[in-house]
Image (spheres, grey):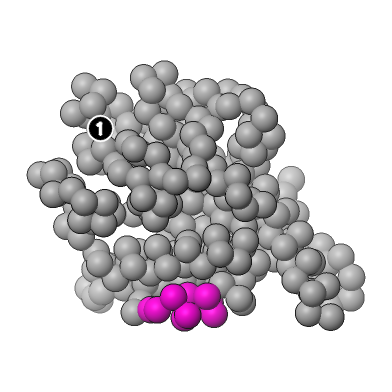
Amino acid sequence: MFPNPGSRPDEPGACAPVIGITTYLQRAQTGVWDVPASFLPKTYLDGVTDAGGIAVLLPPQPTTPACAARVLSRLDGLIIAGGVDVDPARYGQAAHEKTDAPQTMRDTWDLALLDAAIATEVPFLAICRGAQVLNVLRGGTLHQHLPDVVGSPRYQLGGGAFNRVEVEITPGSTIARLVGEHSVGSMYHHQAIDEVGDGLVVTARSDDGVVEAVELPSVPFGVAVQWHPEEETDDRRLFAGLVEAAKAYATERMKQDA
């Protein structure tokens, strides 16, 4: 039911939009090997390719704003994927006892790519940790451990088990246009947005008031969700929205370069 990227060129020589996805960088085991590795669950790649895009991985590495901008110049869209907690020093707080050990290089990489995407209006979708990265980039803060706020572990049951939580979406928002004003998301997060960053608009909350999505209206497509749409294998609408925005961005860039 989803398009094949290789079968949908709009004109001779055209290609589906290229979407960069940030990755993990930590120890991984495969066969006889137990080594530091860059990796990402295949569900992220499937979300992009099912929606008609081409996925490329962006492993954490040393960078500068100029290097991040160069990477973005080769992409039509960006996904900031989930993963470990953002270093609370980035938003002026001491670490909670439940907060992950910081991964400085990954934080720097994700923040630089997202900053470059905003500056050049590359369409982006930020997922879980990605939503928190966006909020921190814009000067916001995070709740470091949601059970302290809502009184239950409903947003992160543990053991890799996603919980289904209903969210109410703001009418007229980009997310509402894509998925409607009511949705159920696959949740696996113990942190969430607290003070909202500059220029961001909250466009979804759960029934206990936790922020589950924000958007950046100053760019053509800047969407961040706290839930995991890559786990919704029968619903690729958020990915489709990103891919369509990336196609429009690529087309406009080609016109400017012509």
Q: Amino acid at mark 1?
A: Leu
Can the viewer see residue 82 in this picture?
A: no
Q: Residue at the spot x=41%, y=32% of the render?
A: 211
Residue closest to the far top: 207
Residue 142's spot in the image, x, y percent? 29, 42
Can the viewer see residue 2 in this picture?
A: yes
- For the residue pair 66 and 167, the one nearer the viewer reads as 66
- For the residue pair 152 and 124, the one nearer the viewer reads as 124
**Is residue 221 covered in magenta?**
no
Q: Residue at the spot x=52%, y=58% of the render?
A: 79
Instruction: Tell whether 241 sits left or right of 56.
Output: right
Q: Residue at the spot x=47%, y=81% of the render?
A: 67
- For the residue pair 66 and 87, the one nearer the viewer reads as 66
Q: Secondary structure at mark 1?
A: loop
Q: Residue at the spot x=65%, y=67% of the render?
A: 76
Instruction: Tell whether 78 sits left or right of 7.
Output: left
Residue 196's spot in the image, x, y percent? 39, 39
Q: Quadrant of the C terminus?
A: bottom right
Examine the image and state in which quarter residue 45 appears: bottom right
Examine the image and state in which quarter residue 252 appears: bottom right
Q: Which residues are magenta?
A: 63-71
Residue closest to the far front: 198
Residue indicated by mark 1: 146
Q: Quadrant of the N terminus?
A: top right
**Is residue 69 covered in magenta?**
yes
Predominant SS of the magenta segment: helix
Residue 54's spot in the image, x, y percent? 64, 66
